[in-house]
Image (cartoon, rainbow, N blue to C red):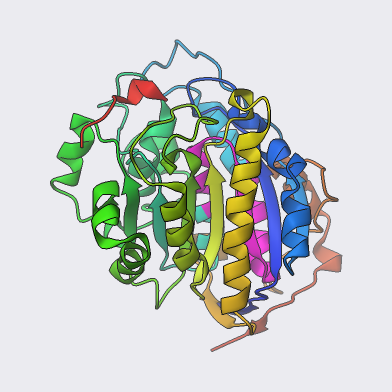
Amino acid sequence: MAVKIVRQPNKIALLGSPTSAAAMSLGHEGAPAALRAAELVERLASSGYSVTDLGDDPPQLHQADEESPRARNIPRVIAALEALKPRVEQAIKSGALPLVLSGDGSVILATLAGVRRYFRHLGLIYFDRDADLNTPATTSSGCVDRMVISHVVGRGAAELVRFWPEPPLVREPDLALFGTARLDPAEEEVLSRTPLRRYLAADVHAKGAAAAAEAAIDGIHAGGHEFVLHLDVDVIADFQATNDPGSGGLSLDEVREALGVFAQQKHLAAIDVAGYNPAKDPEGEGARSVVELLVSVFRQRLGALEEAVPVTAEISSAAASAETDKGEVVVPAPAAGEAWSSEDLSESAQGSGDRNRETEEPSGTSGPSDDSH
């Protein structure tokens, strides 16, 4: 089944996923609320965007979980993913750009899965200080946040690999690590034998941020198919409002320059922002810095994309099995600030058959170990 999605470049769908379940401490779950409090919505609106704030999912909090030392808090991680995924699907369908304010980095699995409902061929730019290539077999901490890319490409904890029923979520040649500045020995070994594309912080310094970003786009062929952008704010050198800050890496100006290139691509399907911890930012300076960064980049995007771009999407076979013979069930969005869980969606969908509204048109370098998170 093919559908036509009409992208509206001046529209943003804001989604909050307040979770610290995959991290090694509390705090990340406060990120969506703190970034809103720093006037993200108002600043984006004043820049020319129509922002629909779809509120937050139910919080999922870090716990010690000594019973699962190799992959901690998996049930809570999955709960966060299952709540977010259908909301990303709805945002994609609306034609707006989903902007996901997440806590820990595991949320990218739900963002990718939500986009994959409509786009079978999907790339990922993983803009992060860490490669996140550990697995339960190689970890010494059990921190799922340090296993994100392994799960994206189909390795790691079985429950998370199977979150998307047709793994991998992204093929290795379609995934670029960007700005990586910390690798532990197990991750270096993986990179020595994988087709994952990588643009380490040292490479970005040498090539220039904009040129390196263009190379990453070309490397995953994002000029021809959709891609998702993940930004972990710990990639910014000396940014302290995160669980694991680091010196070196990329400067704020380099991050802004590279983000500007990524954001202006017409095939950008969603953005996920992770890693900000308001518990480490009592004065809110870090939140204001993140908001300023995002607003400046979105201004560049709006200037570059002046006309709506129709996109033909192929619903994946896994998602198509959930389609009705009359088309897709459309679930009304919650009011801003309301929580929307996967249970809410299920209940709404079951009762909405007679009010189904189909809106598409058919169309024919070694660093610290993973204990640091």
State yes or no: residue 294 in magenta.
no
Residue 32 in which image quadrant: top right
Q: Position of residue 26 (x, y in %)?
A: 58, 21
The residue at the point 50 percent across, 61 percent down is: 116
Q: Position of residue 246 (x, y in %)?
A: 39, 31
Q: How many marks?
A: 0
Q: Is residue 303 above or below residue 263?
A: below
* Image quadrant where one finds the C terminus: top left
Which contiguous range is marked in magenta?
Answer: 83-111
The residue at the point 29 percent across, 25 percent down is: 368
Q: Position of residue 52 (x, y in %)?
A: 77, 59
* Image quadrant where one finds the N terminus: bottom right
> Can residue 289 be seen at all in this image of the molecule?
yes
Residue 70 in which image quadrant: top left
Q: Is residue 300 above or below residue 75?
A: below
Q: Position of residue 51 (x, y in %)?
A: 76, 61
Q: Is residue 295 above or below residue 77?
A: below
The residue at the point 59 percent across, 24 percent down is: 280
Q: Is residue 304 above or below residue 105?
A: below
> Can residue 324 be seen at all in this image of the molecule?
no
Q: Between residues 56 and 76, which one lies in front from this camera angle?
A: 56
Residue 94 in which image quadrant: bottom right
Q: Between residues 66 and 125, which one lies in front from this camera angle?
A: 125
